[in-house]
Image: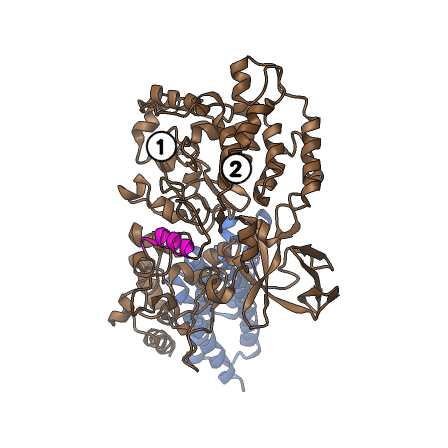
Chain colours: A blue, B brown
């Protein structure tokens, strides 16, 4: 992906996950049991994390776009892999949190929350590749 | 790299604990011993079970026993000085602790710290450490409904002489068994068996779900949890009463809500071992407990008379709250069916007051097994279909059980009969609502409606309302129950309310404080105001109130002679003093010792 594509993705992610924050605040305002009951505690935590990580990853993509512009000489497999890992992280991390909280059992999210650690590892990998490429 | 790291992470979680139970110990519940280490405490449960944990937090089970602090105490502890039966105490607090000082020779002694409290729904009792190191009750309790201190001895339906002989509850010998969770009397350091240690104060998660250390250890593995969830299987490492058969599920409640003595066989130390959820009631408690208790109390000279421990009506129906399982197991629904406590009671998510399941608030709980009765409608109930009198529980679970300043529903589900003619006999549902009617009237109605045989009745029960006979000639339990019903709005509506003042005034001077309290409360709102009456005031003050209430009563409305005689009135509405006194002279003064 190009720097412009990362920049576009970053702003869209901020837009979507900031909007999710508004939805969560609305759930609070309407005092909906599905979100506020004590039994829904794990869901509340997971969706809040989805909102926060989505916005954060949008900002990371903006930073990555700026890095690409600042270092046009960075080419090759490392750059491509870092770009793809960052996109994977942007999808998997918030998706894992959100989907994991859709159906909960006691204090446990459902198995889709396993997307989150995979996304986390992708983010770590992308960050490591970008750091290594820095002169 | 990513796939590799992910695989390592998942594998690390999975190998932490075996995925499926592999040993017999896990598959059997409860775990074979109840060492203190087998209990983890309720705090460990909340992270995985936030919903049930939150509803338990709202329950009176949780607050049954608490560390006494100013924030948790319902009583003010603001310098109150309380005196009763020769003891004077001053309540106070400082530095976040509750304190009590007792006066001796007119001088208050050193303050003692109040260590725990028990109760929070109706009464709150406070405990201090006695000189011998044991926890003992203060002689005053806080009554929640009135927001006032009352003498502890007056909070039970116990004969004043028996109360004077008693020493109050002892935490370290009895009370901890039902008022705390995860208890042990064994001290591993010394080998002694008299050291009480508890995991949780109050009735906590593991009282009903069993010791959970095993469960917690095995469920650290998320794959195990997901596997159980997806397969819809119950977790064999913990007890869930809904997955037990009715007898074992009921035993969970019966460990405290029954008339039961720990089963101590020759050479058996089982009374030292706590009952564990999932176990069989009869393995820990004597099935013939009431009779044994009765015998033991007789041998100690505490009881006299033929009744069983004063906790039962002659037909075996319990008349003391807190023994619901003992009553329920004698119901046809339990003897011939699979009735479980949890069919009607919901421990999580229901109103904490009675913890009734939604279905139990309607007749659906009964009509599921008795559709013919539901179909018969008014032909069965003979009352207005939508009224309270047509509800199944009104007739089949009458309030013939005394507990905590109220008449409580009997958990022996039975059909009404014209019972109550014999001395000490259980009042029937009909006459507890139709307070102005005779037992003969009830017998006639039941014969006409349900083909019941007409019993031979003594003359008084053909002439005088059964409630009045019970209130004037009955023992303390009968008098307390009738006093409560005389104040019941539904009964007042069914019976009229112009004739009760004389009998209530009479009960205001009863020997038992509970009877006086209930009679006073029955007068409130209709004939008197609460601030007028104090049921633990000196006798002269109480009698003055009774006289004022009687003087303020304008008399009943004029009636035909038979109708007036039924209510112990003269045709002009004034009291038939002669008949009233004749019946009052027959009062059953057998000492009653109903400890709840």
Who comes first in sequence, dot 2 or dot 1? 1
Q: Quadrant of residue B214?
A: bottom left
- Subunit of mark 2? B
Please name the residue that numbered disc 2 is placed on: B479
User: Could you say which is closer to the camera, residue B335 or residue B82?
Assistant: B82
Is residue B484 among what the camera can see? yes
Q: Are marks 2 and 1 on the same chain?
A: yes
- Specify the segment rendered in magenta: B287-299
Q: Position of residue B244 (x, y in %)?
A: 30, 54
Against B217, residue B327 (above or below) is: above
Alpha-carbon neighbours of circle 1 within 10 Å: few (<14), some, or many (≥20)? few
Residue at (34% x, 28% y) in the render? B374
Reply yes or no: does residue B288 show up in magenta: yes
For mark 2, give the secondary structure.
helix
For residue B244, side relative to residue B324 (left or right): left
User: Could you say which is closer to the camera, residue B415 or residue B26?
Assistant: B415
Is residue B47 among what the camera can see? no
Q: Position of residue B58 (x, y in %)?
A: 53, 54
Mark 2–mark 1 Cα distance, whole angstroms, equals 23 Å
For residue B53, side relative to residue B26 (left or right): right
Q: Position of residue B1 (x, y in %)?
A: 37, 79
Please name the residue that numbered disc 1 is placed on: B415
Spot the residue most to the bottom.
A135
């Amino acid at each position: 992906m190009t720097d412009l594509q990362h920049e576009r993705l970053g702003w869209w992610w901020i837009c979507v996950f900031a909007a999710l924050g508004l939805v969560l605040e609305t759930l609070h305002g309407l005092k909906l049991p599905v979100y506020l009951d004590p039994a829904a505690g794990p869901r509340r935590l997971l969706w809040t994390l989805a909102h926060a990580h989505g916005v954060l990853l949008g900002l990371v993509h903006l930073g990555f776009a700026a890095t690409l512009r600042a270092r046009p000489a960075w080419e090759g497999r490392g750059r491509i892999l870092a770009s793809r890992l960052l996109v994977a992280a942007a999808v998997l991390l918030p998706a894992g949190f959100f989907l994991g909280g859709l159906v909960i059992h006691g204090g446990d999210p459902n198995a889709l929350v396993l997307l989150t650690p995979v996304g986390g590892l992708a983010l770590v990998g992308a960050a490591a590749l970008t750091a290594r490429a820095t002169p | 790299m990513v796939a590799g790291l992910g695989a390592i992470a998942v594998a690390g979680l999975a190998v932490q604990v075996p995925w499926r139970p592999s040993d017999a110990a896990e598959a059997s519940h409860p775990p074979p011993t109840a060492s203190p280490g087998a209990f983890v405490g309720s705090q460990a449960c909340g992270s995985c079970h936030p919903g049930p944990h939150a509803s338990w937090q709202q329950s009176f089970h949780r607050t049954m026993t608490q560390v006494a602090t100013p924030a948790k105490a319902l009583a003010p502890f603001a310098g109150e000085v309380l005196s009763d039966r020769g003891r004077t105490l001053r309540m106070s607090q400082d530095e976040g602790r509750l304190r009590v000082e007792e006066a001796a020779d007119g001088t208050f002694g050193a303050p003692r710290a109040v260590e725990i409290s028990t109760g929070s729904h109706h009464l709150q009792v406070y405990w201090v450490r006695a000189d011998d190191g044991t926890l003992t009750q203060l002689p005053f309790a806080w009554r929640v409904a009135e927001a006032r201190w009352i003498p502890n001895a007056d909070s039970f339906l116990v004969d004043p002489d028996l109360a004077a002989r008693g020493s109050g509850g002892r935490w370290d010998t009895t009370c901890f068994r039902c008022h705390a969770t995860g208890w042990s009397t064994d001290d591993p350091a010394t080998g002694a068996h008299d050291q009480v240690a508890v995991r949780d104060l109050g009735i906590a998660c593991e009282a009903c779900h069993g010791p959970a250390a095993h469960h917690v250890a095995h469920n650290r593995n998320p794959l195990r949890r997901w596997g159980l969830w997806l397969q819809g299987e119950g977790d064999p490492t913990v007890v869930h009463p809904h997955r037990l058969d009715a007898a074992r599920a009921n035993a969970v409640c019966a460990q405290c809500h029954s008339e039961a003595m720990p089963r101590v066989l020759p050479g058996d130390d089982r009374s030292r071992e706590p009952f564990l959820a999932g176990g069989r009631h009869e393995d820990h408690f004597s099935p013939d407990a009431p009779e044994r208790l009765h015998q033991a109390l007789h041998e100690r000279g505490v009881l006299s008379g033929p009744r069983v421990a004063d906790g039962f009506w002659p037909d075996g129906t319990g008349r003391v709250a807190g023994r619901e399982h003992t009553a329920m197991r004698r119901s046809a629904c339990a003897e011939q069916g699979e009735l479980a406590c949890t069919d009607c009671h919901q421990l999580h998510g229901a109103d904490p007051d009675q913890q009734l399941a939604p279905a139990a608030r309607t007749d659906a709980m009964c009509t599921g097994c008795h559709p013919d009765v539901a179909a018969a409608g008014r032909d069965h109930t003979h009352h207005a279909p939508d009224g309270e009198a047509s509800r199944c529980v009104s007739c089949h679970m009458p309030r013939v059980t005394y507990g905590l300043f109220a008449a409580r529903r009997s958990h022996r589900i039975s059909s009404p009969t014209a019972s109550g003619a014999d001395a000490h006999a259980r009042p029937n549902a009909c006459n507890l609502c139709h307070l102005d009617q005779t037992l003969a009237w009830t017998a006639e109605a039941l014969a006409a409606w349900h083909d019941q045989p007409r019993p031979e009745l003594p003359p008084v029960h053909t002439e005088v309302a059964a409630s009045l006979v019970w209130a004037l000639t009955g023992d303390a339990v009968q008098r307390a129950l009738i006093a409560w019903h005389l104040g019941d709005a539904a009964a007042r509506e069914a019976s009229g309310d112009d004739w009760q003042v004389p009998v209530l005034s009479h009960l205001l001077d009863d020997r038992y404080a509970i009877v006086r309290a209930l009679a006073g409360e029955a007068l409130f709102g209709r004939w008197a105001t609460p601030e007028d009456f104090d049921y633990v005031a000196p006798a002269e003050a109480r009698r003055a109130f009774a006289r004022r209430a009687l003087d303020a009563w304008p008399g009943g409305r004029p009636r035909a002679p038979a109708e007036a005689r039924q209510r112990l009135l003269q045709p002009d509405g004034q009291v038939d003093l002669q008949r009233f006194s004749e019946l009052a002279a027959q009062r059953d003064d057998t000492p009653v010792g109903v400890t709840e």
